[in-house]
Amino acid sequence: MTTAENRNGTAPDDALFDAVLYPHRSLSPTGFLILMGAISGCSIALGTVFWIAGAWPVVGFFGLDVLLIYVAFRLSYRDARRYEVVRLTRTALTIERFVRGHQVMQKQLQPYWLNVRVEEERTGPDRLMLRSHGQAFEIGAFLSPPEKQDFADTLTSALAKVRSA
């Protein structure tokens, strides 16, 4: 599940809400190998046709296309190794951001005054914003608009339980 998933299947004793946000990638590593094999095969076949026809310089462009597609997918997979952990306790909402397995940011917000909202942008994607005491913080920038709204609704519901307790 892309939006909210309990880590290890259960939340810690003191956590009322524990979620991991991570980008969705629809192409599996096996699918990537199959796709690259198909692209390479087509490039070799077409390159051979052009070589036989005497247009041998075109073969280099077919190889360049395969290389650029490979690099683009590798960068996409590298970017997919980022995630955010959102943990709500009675006293704090903690957000931890990880890039390639290394924590790059940790932020704690007080849950009683926290406002969660999906802000629609005129230009660019919607933003999932957390606001508290004059601070604004964006989370889940890599989520799709429906996933952002789903997560905002789930987090708002968890915050309501904290405030009512």
Image: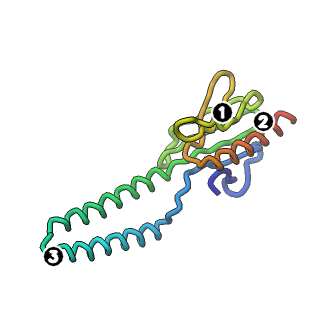
Which of 83/59 is in front? 59
Q: Of callouts 2 and 3, which one flags the residue occurring earlier in the amino acid sequence?
A: 3
Q: Which residue is mark 2?
A: 90
Q: Of callouts 3 and 1, which one flags the residue occurring earlier in the amino acid sequence?
A: 3
Task: Check disc 2 and give the amino acid type.
Answer: Arg
Q: 10 Å neighbourhood of mark 1: few (<14), some, or many (≥20)? A: some
Task: Check disc 1 and give the amino acid type.
Answer: Leu
Q: In the rendered view, tell whether residue 36 sits above or below residue 74.
A: below
As drawn, the residue found furthest toward the right would be 165
**Pointer 1 with pointer 2, Cβ within 8 A:** no
Residue 25 circle label: none
Q: Residue at x 32, y 75 (%)?
A: 41
**Quadrant of the drawing holding the C terminus:** top right
Q: Position of residue 107 (x, y in %)?
A: 61, 33
Q: Which residue is mark 3?
A: 53
- Front: mark 1 or 2: 1
Q: Residue at x 68, y 42 (%)?
A: 87
As drawn, the residue found furthest toward the left would be 54
- Front: mark 3 or 1: 3
**Pointer 2 with pointer 3, Cβ within 8 A:** no
Which of 72/22 is in front? 72
* Residue 126 horizontal side relative to residue 78, left or right: right
